Structure formats: C-alpha cells, structure tokens
Amino acid sequence: MRAARPVLAALAALVFGTGACAAEMRPPPGASSCTGCHAEGAAMGRLEGRSEAEIVAALDAFRSGTRPATLMNRIAKGFDAQESRAIAAWFAAQGAR
Amino acid sequence: MRGTPSVSRRTILGGAAAVALARPALGGTPPRVVVVGAGFGGATAARCLAAGGVDVTLVEASERYVACTGSNAVVIGLRGIEAQTFRHDALGRAGLRFVRATAEAVDPAARRVRLGDGTVLAYDRLILSPGIELRFDAVPGYDAGAAEAMPHAWKAGEQTVRLARQLAAMPEGGTVVLSAPANPYRCPPGPYERASLIAHFLKTRKPRAKLILLDAKDTFSKQRLFEAAWAKLYPDVLEHVPLAGGGQVSEVDPAAMIVRTDFAEYKADVACIIPPQRAGRIAALAGCADRSGWCPIDPATFESRLVPGIHVIGDAAIAGAMPKSAFSANAQGKVCAQAVIDLLAGREPESPLLINTCWSLVAPGYGISVAGVFRPTDGLLADVPGAGGISPLDAPDAVRQQEAAYAESWYRTITRDVFG
C-alpha cells in the first residue's frame, strides 16, 4: 500500500492540478496558509512555479526589512530559515508539475 | 482545480482513495469523512479532503453562503449584498458529495450523523465547521424578535440589508448606537470596523448625526490604529464608551429603541446590537462545546478534546491566539484536512504552522491590518514570538490605500478559493 501511494498521488495531481489543496505531497508546515492570499490574478501574486531561491530570498528580505512591505514583513518573521526553505521548495515543485 | 470533468475525477479518485487510505481493519472500505458547514472552514476542508482522494460528504443547510467578511461595506451602501453571496454549486463539482440538509444529531460512539430529513451518514472522521450561534439569552430584552428592530448583522444576509436600510433611512442629526460584546466572538476587529464605516457614512451623508459605540471591554483588536483614525477622521461623530466608562449594555427595549447600561440610557434612531455568541448548535449537540459554549481542540489536528473522531474548525473552535476570522477558518480547514488524511492513512500528523491576516477599513481606501503566525505550544495555538502584529501607526496614506486594495484582493482570492 505504501508503495502505491506516490503513483496514486501523482495521478491525483494530474487530475487536480495544484493550488490550495494540492494533493500530491504533504505541504510543509505553513505552506497551506499562503494560498489564502497568493493566487493567480491576485495583487499578492501566485507562488507556485516561482523558484525556490526567489521565494527564500523574498522571505529573507521581508524578514530583514530590506524589501518594503505592508504585511509580509510581519508574517515572514514567523518562519525560520529552514521552514522558509521548505515552503519555498514546495511552491517551486508545484509549478514544475 | 476547475474545468476538469467531474466524472473522471470521481472515477479516478474513488479508486485512489480506496487503495491509499483504506485501513486494514476496514477490509477495503474507503474511509468516509463528513463535514458539516460549508462556510470558509468547512468548504475549504471538504475541498482539500476531496483533492486528497477522500470520500467526503459536505452537509450544509443553506442554498447560499453570505460572507460576513467585507459585509460592513454593505452596511453603509458601499456595495450590495450580492457581492457577499456565493452559491454552493461549484462545491458539488469539486469531487465531493454536497448534501443540502441540516445536521440534527451526532452519535459519536456509533460515528453517525443524523440529518433533518432522517438520513443517517456514517463517518470515520467528522469535521464540524458550524460557525456561531448568537446568544439571544445574554442581553435582557435582546431576543430573536428584537433583532428586527435592532439588527445584529453579525450573520450576514437579511440582517445586513436590514441594518443598511435603517441607516439609509435615518434622519439627519440622528443617533446610532452600536454595541460590541466581550471576548471571544466572531471577528474581533469587526465591531470597530463597523463603527468606523458607520462614522464615515454619518460624516458624509447625515449631517450632525452621532454614533455611540458601547463596548463590553476596554481593550480590542487594532485598538491604537482605530483610535488614531477615529481621532483624525471622526472626532465629532464617534463616541466610544469602553467597559470602564460604563459601556456594557445591561438591557435593550426594542419597542422604544432604547439601549441601557448600568449608568445611562441611550435613545437610538438606529441600534445595532452585537450579542455574545457561542459555537454553532451542532457543536453543542455533538458534545464538543465546553461550558464556555466554544469547542476545545487539539491544536495540531483540530480534533475535539471532548469527543474523539470529531474535529472542530473555524469560529466554533477555541484556537488559542488565533482569532475567529475567515482567513483563520480557511487556514484551519486546510491543516485539519491534511491531519485527517494523515490519521486515516495511519500517519502521524505534522505539527503545523498557520497564518492569519485580517484587514479592516476605517474609511473607504484606508485599510489597516493585523497578522499572526501560530503554532501548537503547550496544547494551544500560540503566536510565534516576534512575528505578526498590526500595521505601523505612522504609515503614510499610500500604505493605508495599499492595505485597502490588498483587503479587496484577498476577498476575491479567498472566496474564489473556497466557493469558486
């Protein structure tokens, strides 16, 4: 049963695409909240398909205050470097499918 | 998630769920999840479960959902109630079973839900997202009938439109009385956004009219931002009476349009009474509510502390530092769905991180926000230290404008995500 799961998950991904509830793998802690704002066509922009490096750099810049923000500076401080990397890698992988 | 024929979805995922999620003890029967309530929490959870290949039934009593978030704009005529109204049709095409019925009873031992029409649904896990019930026993004189003369407008829909009409029809120089309840309640900054927008309406449309905000507490969400904006924008319109100043409403007389506190009597042309609240009815019927009227939960899985196998999300849950908001309910719906998928598959759920963001308008084009990041700590969802907080007090107008625009963008995104 365990061996079957990745295949079926990939199948689910093909059917459902990506987004808030992407089923293909367990999102890392924090990632599923992001799509409350970040989406195609939104002022906040879509995260899926951006590179891991870009998302990590953006979170770093929001945390340090070097990138101007109304709100992401406050949110980015809730994630350490490792959590940020995991979230970034997950969104990068969503776009690659 | 849109545009794929539902037949192929269901066909493929039915098989996927059966294999990926079956527990040996069930001998191949796919686990069933029932979700009660198709608001921001329940609809999100149901969609995520369906996307994860779970057999999910979503039970909802209403044909349409009318969103509270953003509805203060309807109260002062900035937009129509139709902009708050969402049909549930799309949910029926999201790979889940949508059942329009009330949930009348839960048998946690047998793991069954009974619906209003007598149908019984068996579940392996039940998710309750019932929102709030207004307590019509809490303020003397304020029962369901009184809410016609003195709308609460805290469940959006007819009540919202009623309050909007009363405000539009009130005389120049009239008095509006708005009361805010003690914590906890749905949308902590909501009464103060409503006060701000009504003050804006009076200032621009009803010369010499006043708003008295009677408050059952002394501190509130985004307080310094609201108070700074009120001093700047509405010094002659809005009077805030905190608890310490005698702001707790002790009685209302809807026939005479009088609102009383222990210290004073206010004659209102329009009165909006936001009463105390508790978790939606089915939560109490299922045994998930404690003496506070709200539902204690495990902060990682949202499973009830009182009834195993039942999860409670959204406004009904006691979510620690996480406020009762649409954003929270959506974030909790996703985390809870993932935890349920993990539990059904015999996997240990991960300790989650959740975000909340709430914007409020203090005037059209003038937005402020509060944000937070939360993780389970000592059995509750607690703020991640150093993160979150409110908009800067000294932000220029351009930032306030930008926050108002982000609020609108978020509203479009979240409602499309949940109901689209």
Image (cartoon, rainbow, N blue to C red):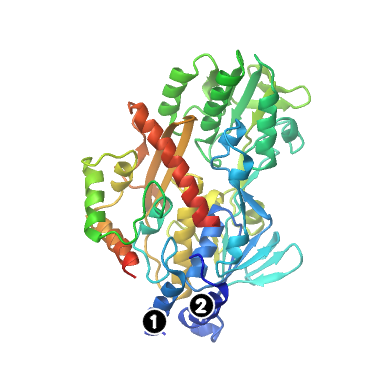
* Residue B6, numbered label: none
Label 2: few (<14), some or many (≥20) within 10 Å?
many
Q: Examine the image and state in which quarter residue B58 appears.
A: bottom right
Residue A80 in the image, given as x and y percentages of width and height:
25, 53
Residue behind mark 2: B13
Residues under numbered marks 1 and 2 in contact, where contact means CB atoms less than 8 Å apart: no
- Label 2, secondary structure: give it: helix
Question: In the image shown, does B228 or B114 lie closer to the viewer?
Answer: B228
Task: Decide which of A25, B94 is in the foreground and name it.
Answer: B94
Viewer-nearest residue: B103 or A12 = A12
Quarter where residue B419 is shown: bottom right
Confirm whether circles 1 and 2 share one chain.
Answer: no
Image x and y of residue B101, in percent: 71, 61
What's the chain of the residue with tag 1? A
Question: Amino acid type of disc 2?
Answer: Leu
Residue ID at (52%, 69%): B50
Q: Residues within 10 Å of mark 1 (few under 14, many from 20)?
A: some
Seen from this angle, which residue lies furthest right?
B255
Task: Report how many numbered discs are placed on residues in the image.
Answer: 2
Query: Is B57 placed left or right of B347 in the picture?
Result: right
Which numbered dot is residue A7? 1
Amino acid type at circle 1 is: Val
Left or right side of B175 for B204: left
Q: Is residue B405 above or below residue B89?
A: above
- Is label 1 in a helix, a strand or a loop? helix
One can see residue B291 in this view:
yes
- Residue at figure coordinates x 45%, y 76% from the top left: B345
- Which residue is pictured at 38% across the width and 54% down the height? A34
Where does the C terminus of chain A fall, quadrant-wise?
Answer: bottom left
